[in-house]
């Protein structure tokens, strides 16, 4: 059914503030976007830049590009900034990350050098393997939120931005459980006053600051952060969109294609063993058991949800699912992910699938960052607020309304995304029977 969404024009500059702006993902995203807007790079992997959308009936053959029919912010209007615990500008950070070649970075060197991180809010108890030097002086959680809000406002004024999007591409924090201070806005506010440094992580300070400023907040790591009802309540009050969590880039992307295939064909599954080697800073952080646990929880939920283990006990009742991440410096950002999948066919006969994905982590993540920034800004201009489950397509642990089951199947997520775009532009949603 068609509904009309009133969309505010994408007028003026859009400030993109990235937490962890000196990291591999952030610097690859920013350098790549600048190169695309210069006309020297191709935005491979980005739906907002390359994908088409079918409009009307099948026999109409209308497949315009998304960016030609959906009112997205123009790449020329993006202004980048952010925070990091290291002082390097984004050019230096990108060189160190060793994802893009120096010759590709040199094309946008001048612009990258102007992007200098603001001092970060950092607490080593939440990321044990890093020791940041470019950090705000120690303060209470409340004071941290206030400083970050000032940063956002100053950046907006200094760069003449109409709107801001804040995206987390910083390190994965240790696993923390949801506790009473997370359960409501009032409880969280009290915890800020009480300086509860156990319950309130640095990422929550960034999210709280962004949403308090009415900016969309995107969570690219598996941190608890966006899962807490307190933040949902704040986002409703401030009318800010929230999305997350944990970019779906490599192994989990494949899982969310292969697992639906097994279920669609009613093939059984006995076990799924996934292991990875990677040697970037993210790998080093994830070598710490606390940070790994956060990632593990995010990666493990996918298969059970897709396969509906309780609905199909005879096919999926006893799955052994294991995920390993091994820090192996020689590989740098070029992760290798292996999957051994023990499947079951007719009369219970066993078979195996083996996947060896030699990928590049940040090369896969960068186009997601660009799409998420543009779609989160679109959501804001559409007046959408709170959890944006239509952006599940991009995440390993997609946010969903309380009490709802998350949607993990990549192609269902894709349909939801495109149907939301159709609604936004006042086109009928897709019906495969027409
Ligand atoms: N690349 C992928 O495919 C992928 C997929 C899913 C999730 N992620 C997540 O994205 C995040 C970034 O990945 P990466 O490879 O760029 O890692 P990275 O280690 O290269 O970058 C993280 C950056 O965050 C900074 N940082 C850490 N704590 C901070 C804080 N409190 N405030 C500001 N900056 C802080 C670090 O100094 C570093 O520069 C990680 O959490 C990773 O798990 C990446």
Image: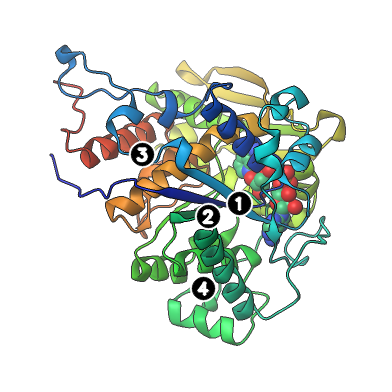
Q: Residue at x 67, y 25 (%)?
A: 359
Which circle marks residue 72 in the picture? 3
Q: Residue at x 57, y 19 (%)?
A: 350
Taking the image as shown, residue 400 lies to the left or right of residue 342, namely left
Q: Nearer the viewer, residue 310 or 264?
A: 264
Q: Mark 1 CB in 8 Å range of ligand 1?
A: no
Q: Nearer the viewer, residue 6 or 430?
A: 6
Rounded to the nearest angstrom, the CA distance separating label 1 from label 4 is 29 Å
Q: Residue at x 50, y 63 (%)?
A: 210
Q: Which residue is mark 2?
A: 159
Label 4: how many residues lie within 10 Å, few (<14), some (14-19) or many (20+)?
many
Q: Earlier in the sequence, mark 4 or mark 3?
A: 3
How many discs mark residues in the rendered view? Answer: 4
Q: Where does the image place residue 163, in percent across and percent down from the top left?
A: 42, 55
Rounded to the nearest angstrom, the CA distance separating label 4 from label 3 is 33 Å
Q: Mark 2 CB in 8 Å range of ligand 1?
A: no
Residue 137 in which image quadrant: bottom right
Taking the image as shown, residue 340 lies to the left or right of residue 279, namely left
Taking the image as shown, residue 103 lies to the left or right of residue 242, namely right
Q: Is residue 135 above or below residue 379?
A: below
Q: Nearer the viewer, mark 2 or mark 3?
A: 2
Check the picture and name the quadrant holding the N terminus. top left
Q: Which residue is mark 4?
A: 182
Which circle marks residue 81 in the picture? 1
Q: Secondary structure at mark 2?
A: loop
Rounded to the nearest angstrom, the CA distance separating label 2 from label 3 is 20 Å
Label 1: how many residues lie within 10 Å, few (<14), some (14-19) or many (20+)?
many
Q: Secondary structure at mark 1?
A: strand
Rounded to the nearest angstrom, the CA distance separating label 4 from label 2 is 34 Å
């Amino acid at each position: 059914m068609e509904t009309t969404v009133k969309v505010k024009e994408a007028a003026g500059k859009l400030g993109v503030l990235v937490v962890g702006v000196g990291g591999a993902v952030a610097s690859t995203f920013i350098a790549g976007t600048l190169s695309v807007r210069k006309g020297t790079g191709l935005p491979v992997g980005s739906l907002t830049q390359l994908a088409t959308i079918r409009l009307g009936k099948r026999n109409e053959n209308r497949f315009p590009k998304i960016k030609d029919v959906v009112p997205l912010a123009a790449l020329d209007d993006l202004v980048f900034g952010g925070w990091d615990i290291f002082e390097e500008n984004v050019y230096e950070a990108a060189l160190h990350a060793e994802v893009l070649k120096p010759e590709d970075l040199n094309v946008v060197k001048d612009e990258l050098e102007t992007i200098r991180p603001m001092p970060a809010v950092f607490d080593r108890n939440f990321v044990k393997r890093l020791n940041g030097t470019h950090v705000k002086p120690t303060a209470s959680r409340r004071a941290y939120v206030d400083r970050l809000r000032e940063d956002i406002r100053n950046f907006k004024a200094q760069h003449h931005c109409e709107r801001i999007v804040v995206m987390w591409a910083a390190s994965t924090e240790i696993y923390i459980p949801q506790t009473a201070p997370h359960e409501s806005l009032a409880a969280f506010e009290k915890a800020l006053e009480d300086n509860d440094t156990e319950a309130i992580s640095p990422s929550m300070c960034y999210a709280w600051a962004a949403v308090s400023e009415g900016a969309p907040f995107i969570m690219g790591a598996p941190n608890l952060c966006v899962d807490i009802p307190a933040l949902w309540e704040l986002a409703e009050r401030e009318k800010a969109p929230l999305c997350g969590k944990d970019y779906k880039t490599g192994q989990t992307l494949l899982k969310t294609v292969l697992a639906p295939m097994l279920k669609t064909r009613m093939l059984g599954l006995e076990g799924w063993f996934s292991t990875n080697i990677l040697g970037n800073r993210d790998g080093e952080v994830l070598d710490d058991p606390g940070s790994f646990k956060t990632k593990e929880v995010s990666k493990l939920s996918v298969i059970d949800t897709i396969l509906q283990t309780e609905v199909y006990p005879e096919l999926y009742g006893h799955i052994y699912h294991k995920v390993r991440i091994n820090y192996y410096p020689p590989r740098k950002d070029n992760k290798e992910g292996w999957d051994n999948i023990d499947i079951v066919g007719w009369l219970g006969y066993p078979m195996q699938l083996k996947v060896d994905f030699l990928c590049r982590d940040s090369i896969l993540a960068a186009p997601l960052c660009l799409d998420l920034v543009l779609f989160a800004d679109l959501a804001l201009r559409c007046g959408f607020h709170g959890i944006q489950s239509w952006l599940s397509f991009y995440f390993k642990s997609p946010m969903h309304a309380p009490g709802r089951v998350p949607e993990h199947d990549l192609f269902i997520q894709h349909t939801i995304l495109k149907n939301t775009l159709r609604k936004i532009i006042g086109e009928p949603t897709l019906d495969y029977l027409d």
